[in-house]
Image: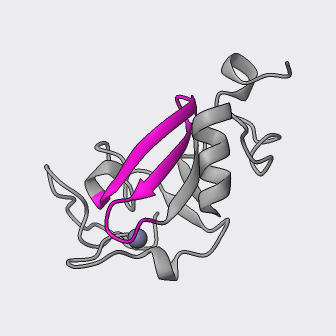
Amino acid sequence: MPKWGFHKLPEHGPNPESRLYRVEGCACAEVKDGYRYVLGFDVLAGGLAELGYETLRERTPWLDLVRCTRCGQHWYVATDTVDDDVYMRRVTLAEAIDIVESAKWPSHFDSMKHVGMEEFGGPE
Ligand SMILES: [Zn+2]
């Protein structure tokens, strides 16, 4: 049983109880690198877009570069499709430019399973 019990999730929009949800501003300052968020609770079907993050580039359908539209911080986001976990890693502006312009991705999630690397991002 999930520790948060039987909260009713909203049918539209982000979950106000998500650790990534803020009425104003954003949660970026409190996001710890590598922290695990729960798909289906912290992030609902609408994805991070509902929480104010825009996707700049996809590496696989489950590995994305996103930018916070509120503070401008870039994040490298992995969604584990089996465990339903979402991981966010800060990337610098220079790293973000490398990703967008040269598809040069940081190696953080290279060895992760279930994020599409086998199908989409395997070794060159
Ligand atoms: Zn932010």
Q: x, y percentage for residue 94?
A: 66, 56
- The answer to which quarter of the image holds residue 104 is top right
120 lies above or below 15: above
Membership of 124 in magenta stretch = no
- Magenta region, main secondary structure: strand
Q: Nearer the viewer, residue 65 or 45?
A: 65
Q: Position of residue 28 (x, y in %)?
A: 46, 74
Q: Is residue 25 above or below residue 2?
A: below
How many marks overall? 0
Q: Nearer the viewer, residue 32 or 58?
A: 58
Quadrant holding the C terminus: top right
Locate residue 1 relative to residue 46 in the image: left or right.
Answer: right
In the depicted structure, whether residue 76 falls above or below residue 59: below
Residue depicted at x 38% and y 71%: 71
Name the residue: 67% across, 19% down. 120
Q: Where is residue 50 shown, x and y percent of the image?
A: 26, 53
Q: Is residue 62 magenta?
A: yes
On screen, residue 7 versus residue 80, left or right, reads left
Can you tell me which quadrant of the image ligand 1 is in?
A: bottom left
The residue located at (18%, 54%) in the rendering is: 13
Q: Residue 102: which quarter of the image?
A: top right
- How was this image coloured? one colour
What is the magenta range?
Answer: 51-72
Residue at 61% of width from left, 35% of height from top? 101
- Residue 74 in percent (x, y) is at 52, 59
